[in-house]
Image: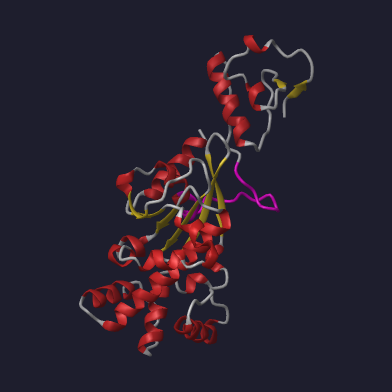
Amino acid sequence: MPELLNEGLPDRSARSKFDFTKWADGQAWKFVKGEDYTSSTETFRYNVKRWAKTQGVEIELRPYPDVDADGNEVPLTKADAVALGVPILTPADFLVLNAAKRVNFAPIAILGAGTGLGEANLVHDGLKWNVVPSEGGHADFAPQDEEQARLFLALHAKFGHVSWERLLSGAGVVNIHNFLSGEERPYDESLPMEIAKAFAAGDEVAARTFAIFVDIYGAEAGNMALRVLARGGVYLAGGVAAKNIEQFTDGRFMTAFLRKGRFQHILAAIPVNLITNPKVGLLGAAEMAMRLL
């Protein structure tokens, strides 16, 4: 970090509006030409860059990646990229499932069932959105009724640990269908679409499969909303929801989302949207790349 100057701050009226004394609790920082400085605080780096531009000072900001406890770089995950893309979306990029009023800069929850179940949260630091990564999809699944309890027991006998991802994913659709049909078909990428086509053709087992899937999806989305009080919104990503929109807009999803007893009124005030733009992850990846320039 640069040297901290405890005395001799310039008069407030003489400071540039981009002077980073306003971002450092009224403190001033002294930089020496040609020296290297390290900061893991993205806000500080961002404002140094803005200040340098207004002052005509040339600086080089090198990427400062997140690291784990052993000092290894933590790569950007698909869920992180999708999360960063959410604030960039326009109303044309999603369907509204619950038209509550969004609270600006309040936490946002994102979950997406596709190949697996990705979960992430967004929090705002006053300048930009930051991803709070999560592996919540691997947390313990909680059945909500007798049928789901029997489904849980069947999967527990097979896998030992039953996570939300065992139900909320392409493989999850197959797991639910196998439970209902009594079959034991191994997962294949073509099977979820085959089940969706069977549902469209009027197959009762396929219809019940999607009803259970959507119910479980709504329950976990409601859990995420409560954990972070996602008054900035809950966003559904992933291919399963985007390719089966009718199953998410008939009211079943929101019924399960709101089924939280005495906290139902809190969830009713949280906006819920289903992302239809398949490039949301690319938008988020581009946002991250821009931050590293």
x%, y% of residue 112?
43, 60
Quadrant housing residue 240 = bottom left
Q: Nearer the viewer, residue 10 or 290?
A: 10
Q: Is residue 199 left or right of residue 67?
A: left
Identify the residue at the far left of this view: 201
Residue with the most extreme right position = 7
At x 41%, y 85%, the residue is 179
Task: Mark yes or no: residue 129 visible.
Answer: yes
Residue 60 visible, this orientation? no
The tally of labels here is 0
Between 254 and 246, the one nearer to me in the picture: 254
* Point 20% across, 77% down: residue: 201
Q: Is residue 218 above or below residue 104?
A: below
The picture quadrant where one finds residue 178 is: bottom left
- Whether the magenta-drawn stretch holds residue 79 is answered as yes
In the visual, does 25 lie left or right of 56? Answer: right
Position in image of residue 109 (x %, y %):
49, 54
Residue extending farthest to the bottom is 182
Colour option used: secondary structure
Asked if residue 116 lies in the magenta stretch, the reply is no
Find residue 85 and report its horizontal and vertical position in percent.
Answer: 43, 46
Q: Nearer the viewer, residue 27 or 99?
A: 99
* Magenta stretch, main secondary structure class: loop
- Considering only vertical position in the picture, is 146 above or below 222? below
Q: Nearer the viewer, residue 62 or 183?
A: 183
Q: State which quarter of the image contains the N terminus.
A: top right
Residue drawn at the location 54% of the way across and 87% of the way down: 157
Q: Position of residue 235 (x, y in %)?
A: 42, 54
Residues shaded magenta = 65-81
Residue 246: name its quadrant.
Answer: bottom left
